[in-house]
Amino acid sequence: MDETAQTFVRTSFSSVVRDNWDLAVGLMDSRGRQFAQSSRSIPSFIGTMPRTLAVMLRRYPASSLNPGDVLISNDGYHGTGHLNDITMVRPIFRRKRLICFIGSVFHTVDIGGAPSVTARDSHEEGLTIPVCKIVREGTENEDVIAFISENLRAPEETLGDIRAQFAAYEMGQAKLLQILDDECIDDLDALVEEILDRSEAAMRRAIEAAPDGVYSDSIQVDGFEEPLTICCEIRIEGGNLSVDYSGTSPQISRPINSAMNFTRAYSAYAIKCAFDPTTPNNDGSFRPVTITAPEGCLINPLRPAPIWARHLSGHYLPPVIFSALSQVMPERVIADCGSPLWNVYFSGRHGDGRRFVKMFFMNGGHGARPHQDGPACLSFPSNVATVPVEHFENSVPLLITEKSLIPDSGGAGRYRGGPAQRVAFRVTSEHPVTMTIRHERVRFPPRGLLGGSPGSPGRDYVNGKRIAAKVRKDLEPGDEVTFDTPGGGGLGAPRERDAASREADLLSGLVTPAGAAAAYGSGAADQGRRGD
């Protein structure tokens, strides 16, 4: 699967795949159960892929599939939670028998329409590709290619990524069949069952090691006009664990609702991280886990609630789960990170008239860990990489004028939260550039854990003037936009931080003397310098 993912990346057309690695590749058995994945995978993509395949097989039963077919869909409610992620699956046959499926998901920056932070329903958010065959027995379906092409601003990039996956499937299928031949494995289902059973047993042992009980937490979400709340109750009973989100705010008519597929994926990911991070990840790991949320709430909306920015609620699920579990396993969780993930969309025209739609990811500070400070600007719970500055500047008429760490932005604690970053862009185009942002952790900064202090809140500016965190705005030539991402929360009481660490903070510039005095007391800066 790693080789398959690398083939996809090497032959891709978009920066979001090539540089951000906003993708996943997985293998599912003949019953649709995921049993292997690429090592570098977006957690939501891995968590939703088998559920998307189940919907696909209701439209096209396995008996109707042929070698060389490829199914496609981007339905947010059946897929990853929004239209910009396209899921494709190809059946693999051996000796005329369907033995498994190879699937992949990738993010496309443009999916048509005019995705907006003010969208009132999912129909406003772009092109929905229904479950269909984009390839029939090895031949591209020209009708599907046509309706995708006619709805996108830059179809060459998206179709290039789609065809890159076709190449990856060919390589992945050949490698898998070669393994089966080399190892004389005739019954893949028996092998998969063993893999799933072992992962299930490992997860049950990990859950059984925790005390039975009910553990809860709630977290505030910035929202729009009014804050929103996500409530979480975790129940551990023997080798079983349930997560219930009853009490969470109702869905809203703005595009930050998290479809249940996305909610399940990031909840399961948090449970895996906390309880059993080292066992290979597959569907067996989640047999002991049940995840529920009331229908019609913020994280289980009813269609056609808008869901374009579903990560603005879904990325809050790991921190609320970790906070609940800190009551029983404080050594296995982290403080809040500077997420939901920050990004910005820029669209406009090059000097020669060509249109562009580009996205830039900006990570906030990572939450402090049980035995170490939080890293700077490391993405969590999503794990996208960052586009190099030079690559971005070469693809759009924008100049990045600053990319720096922000002092005093990481929450104080025995272990300090990761510092936030400041990223500034100047419009160098002769034409206006449209910017779309949808940022969180502005009203409510990342929380500290176990007595740690919160990180700094995020801020957005245009030409030095603060603007709303969820807005679509036209920038004029020469305008400069600046983003201060949120800092990570601290872990443990600040008074427990040792003098050597406080001194290192001052020497590095990540903490100023004034910041040290505010966090640790008026004599903290001098004490840190003396190493007392």
Image (cartoon, rainbow, N blue to C red):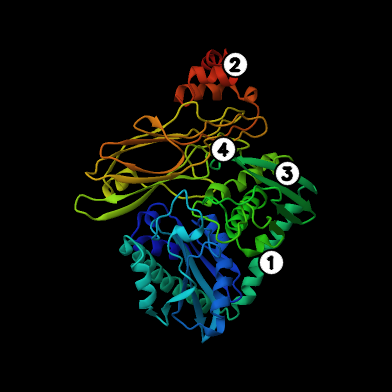
Distance, label 1 to label 4, CA atoms, is 33 Å
The residue where tag 3 is placed is: 216
Name the foreground residue: 14 vs 529: 14
Are the residues flagged by discs 4 and 3 in contact, CB closer than 8 Å? no
Residue 183 can be seen in this image: no
**What kind of residue is marked 3?**
Ser
Instruction: Residue at 59%, 19% (x, y): give it.
Output: 520
**Residue at disc 4, secondary structure:** loop
Q: Name the secondary structure under disc 1.
A: helix
Mark 1: few/some/many CA within 10 Å (<14, 14-19, 20+):
some
Quarter of the image for residue 109 reads bottom left
Residue 531 picture location, percent across and down: 55, 17
Q: Which mark is residue 143?
A: none
Q: Residues within 10 Å of mark 4 (few under 14, many from 20)?
A: many
Q: Secondary structure at mark 3?
A: strand
Q: CA distance from mark 4 to mark 3?
A: 20 Å
Return the x and y of residue 217 as percentages of the image width and height. 70, 42
Q: Amino acid at mark 1?
A: Asp
- Place of residue 429 in the rendered image (x, y in percent of width and height, measured from the top left): 24, 44
Query: Sequence order check: which comes first, mark 1 or mark 4?
Result: 1
Badge 2 is on which residue? 521
Q: Is residue 380 left or right of residue 155?
A: right
The nearer-to-camera label among 1 and 4 is: 4
Residue 517 in view, yes or no? yes
The residue under label 4 is which amino acid type? Gly
Looking at this rendering, what residue extends furthest in the left direction?
352
Write down the residue under mark 1. Answer: 197
Could you tell me which residue is drawn at 49 percent across and 73 percent down? 131
